[in-house]
Amino acid sequence: MRVPFLDLKAQYQTIASEVQAGLQRVLDSCAFANGPEVAAFEKAFSEFLRIEQCVAVNSGTSALHLALIAAEVGPGDEVITTAHTFVATAWAICYVGAKPVFADIDPIAMTIDAAQVGKLISKKTKCLLPVHLYGCAADLDGLVPLAKEHKLALVEDAAQAHGARLHRQRLGTFGDFGCFSFYPGKNLGAYGEGGAVVTDNAEAAERLRRLRDHAQPRRYVHEELGFNMRMDGFQGAVLCAKLPHLDQWNAARRRVAERYCQELAELDGLSLPVPRADSEPVWHLFVVRHRKRDELQKLLADKGVGTGLHYPIPVHLQPAFSYLGLKEGSLPHTEAAAAQCLTLPMFAEMSDAQVDHVIASVKKAMAALA
Ligand SMILES: *Cc1c(COP(=O)(O)O)cnc(C)c1O
């Protein structure tokens, strides 16, 4: 048996007619950039999250970039974030001319450690940018009061956390801005590129709507530096078709995660993810840790189990960030996570037999490594 790391086709087959009807509406209307399907998705997604405003854009990276502009972050400012993330989190900080300052992660939760953040806040700090990595909540109970106390903007990178909750509230709605990606492999994925910024600030949302469309309050009037970051109509239609299924897909992911957690719990040397108390993760990725990660990955590949690495080189050690002068050893928990993490197959359509095969294969591989 082969179990892929992710199977987009399995999901498409369950919603093909709904998606095709939506794409046909876009073809019939020729509303290819923004347009009614995108507007309908913005309304539906803001209702889903219980937030006032949703501004759809052309990627999660653009969402982060525009959110930082709207949060008035610019040259000379520092933004505190995590290096255990996809690189786009840090790109956005650089795009606005600010400096990323990396706080180490909590080694259990794998998300940014609020105590470390507290130590790094300086006069230059303008914004906190936590990531709800793998679909698990970052420590908002620690970060929200810190942002308030120091009058910092709080921007959530919720690109992996569509529908996840902490204390019954959806992630992405705790800070000043929440940023989502609809890259195809995400829990809510477009059939192309997409992203969104959500906020309760109506004035900021209006500015975001202008910024994504060449900063035009009216046609051919450009009031500040603008961007072409509109969502295309086809993606709006796909996302409208998929959103009503999201909670059910996330629940299916939670059932897979529960089985992994139950059946892999007793294996010596294998660490399982530990979501925060009173949270509801959506398991974008199910990431385990092992000291011999590369050997474990190879043994699983031999058994037909596809795995991934998220993320094997932390952002502060990437060549593009060498100008920061951060050496190996500067973020010990982040670096250990990067060396040990291994992502198991996770998608809503996994069959019981596929989950069984992953569990049996991990147990055999662990026995071989012992
Ligand atoms: C996917 C992702 C992004 C970037 O989103 P794109 O849509 O690919 O631009 C940013 N941050 C995190 C944590 C992500 O997983």
Image (cartoon, rainbow, N blue to C red):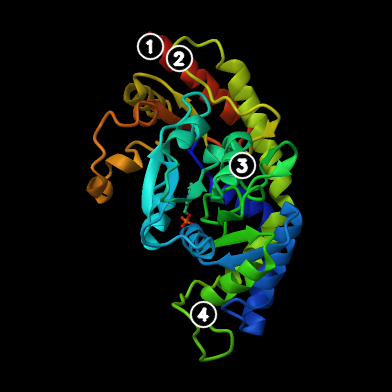
Q: Which of the two discs, 2 and 3, sits closer to the camera? A: 3
Real-space Cα separation, disc 4 to disc 1, in angstroms? 59 Å
Real-space Cα separation, disc 3 to disc 4, in angstroms? 31 Å
Q: Amino acid at mark 2?
A: Lys
Give the number of the disc on residue 368: 1
The reply to whether discs 2 and 3 touch (Cβ–Cβ < 8 Å) is no
Real-space Cα separation, disc 3 to disc 1, in angstroms? 45 Å
In the image shown, does 79 or 230 lie closer to the viewer?
79
Q: Residues within 10 Å of mark 4 (few under 14, many from 20)?
A: many
- Kindly tell me whether mark 3's CB lies below 8 Å from ligand 1: no
Upstream in the sequence, badge 4 or badge 2? 4
Q: Which of the two discs, 4 and 2, sits closer to the camera? A: 4
Give the number of the disc on residue 364: 2
Q: Which residue is mark 3?
A: 144
Q: Residue at x 46, y 33 (%)?
A: 343
Q: Which of the two discs, 3 and 1, sits closer to the camera? A: 3
Q: Residues within 10 Å of mark 3 (few under 14, many from 20)?
A: some
Upstream in the sequence, badge 2 or badge 3? 3
> Residue 318, image x and y in percent?
28, 44
Q: Which of the two discs, 3 and 4, sits closer to the camera? A: 3
Under circle 4, the secondary element is loop
- Kindly tell me whether mark 4's CB lies below 8 Å from ligand 1: no
Q: Amino acid at mark 3?
A: Val
Residue 347 vertical placement versus 180 (above, below): above
Q: Is residue 351 visible?
A: yes
Residue 342 vertical placement versus 88 (above, below): above
> Residue 29, image x and y in percent?
66, 83
